[in-house]
Image (cartoon, rainbow, N blue to C red):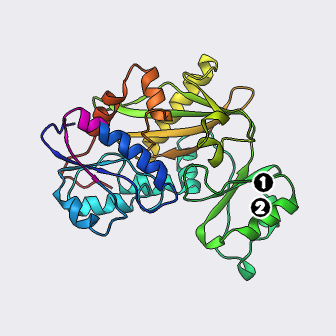
Amino acid sequence: MQSFESARIAVVSGGRSTERERSLMSGRAAWESLDRQGYTTRFLDPADKTFADDIRGADVAFLAIAGQYAEDGKLQGLLEHLNIPYTGSGVAASAVGMHKALAKTIVAAAGVAVLPTVALPTRGRDGEVSTRTVTSTIAFPLILKPLSEGGSIGMTVCRDTAQLADALRSIDPGEGWFVEPFTTGIPVSCGVLEIDGSPVALPPLATIPTDAEFYDYATKRDKTKYRYECPANLSSGTLDAVTTAALDAHDALGCSGYSRSDFIVSPDGRPVWLEINTLPGLSHTGNLATMAAAAGIDYDRLIRMILATAHTSEGYRP
């Protein structure tokens, strides 16, 4: 790992995904931190037409960006071709981590508990998917999710066949969707941060919705609708299970630098892995910063530690 004290650092943020605004919030916070710490920085947005030329002037890319065309390996592939070190996971881990159903298959093979999943065919008869395709495997209540979106965007809870039929009619099957059981419990996140070259789990954080059915897109963007508990108010056994599963998922998917896994913990204390964020949000009050603070890592140090994980090896990186 390097400190990049004299490097030209491009803070890459924004992009053209549905998570653009969340990305910009992270990017501005990280940029201000690096600037405050005396680094030479420039703020670049992949949505700008000059991005491909502008990024060539960077010695390292600090990725504070999320969603499609950013967290899914496409941006990482460009940086690999340009031989520019960057923070976060490589092309393969980013692409697989963004494809939720495939990520669950790999993580489950590593022994981590996941929910059963039905990936919907991209095209059915007349462009529609039969409710029977879903209900033959998944019982109600269930939740319909996009395969490759973040921030809980597009999720729909269905409690009967009529709701499911309506939801299936409203989606574009070509975009990729999957279904899993809708399970009640406590939403818990656990960050993993490479420290001195080794991945370390941060204290798990519970996010408790105060007036929503689950921690959905709207709830995440209204601080009056949820509260944090960090460390989560769970038994020591459950906390250990969460941190172990987060580390196992990080390793199984080939992540590097840092990541954040999301879980649902059942009323009897069993955590089930839901998904991974290979580029977690970096706002001052976000999940990762909150977990880092609970571990005694202030925000500026967190940003410095993430920067230090940017890979500089000239060897092949999948």
Dividing the image into 4 quarters, which one contains the C terminus? bottom left
| 228 on left or right of 303 | right
Residue drawn at x 69%, y 68% is 171
The residue singled out by tag 2 in the image is 134
Q: Quadrant of residue 280?
A: top left
Q: Quadrant of residue 46?
A: bottom left
Crowding near the residue tagged with mark 1, few <14, some 14–19, many ≥20 C-alpha atoms within 10 Å: some
Residue drawn at x 28%, y 49% is 86
Image position of 125 with respect to 290: above or below: below
What are the residue bounds of the magenta stretch? 33-43
Image position of 128 with respect to 288: above or below: below
| 161 on left or right of 253 | right
Q: Which mark is residue 62?
A: none
At numbered mark 1, what does the secondary structure look like: helix, strand or loop?
loop
| Residue 309: image location, x then y, percent | 28, 39
Q: Do residues under tags 1 and 2 come within 8 Å of each other at their CB atoms?
A: yes
The residue singled out by tag 1 in the image is 138
Measured in 3D between alpha carbons, the distance from the residue under mark 1 to the one under mark 2, in whole angstroms, is: 6 Å
Image position of 163 with respect to 207: above or below: below
Say which amino acid is labelled 1: Ile
Q: How many marks?
A: 2
Residue drawn at x 48%, y 39% is 260
| Residue 33: image location, x then y, percent | 30, 35
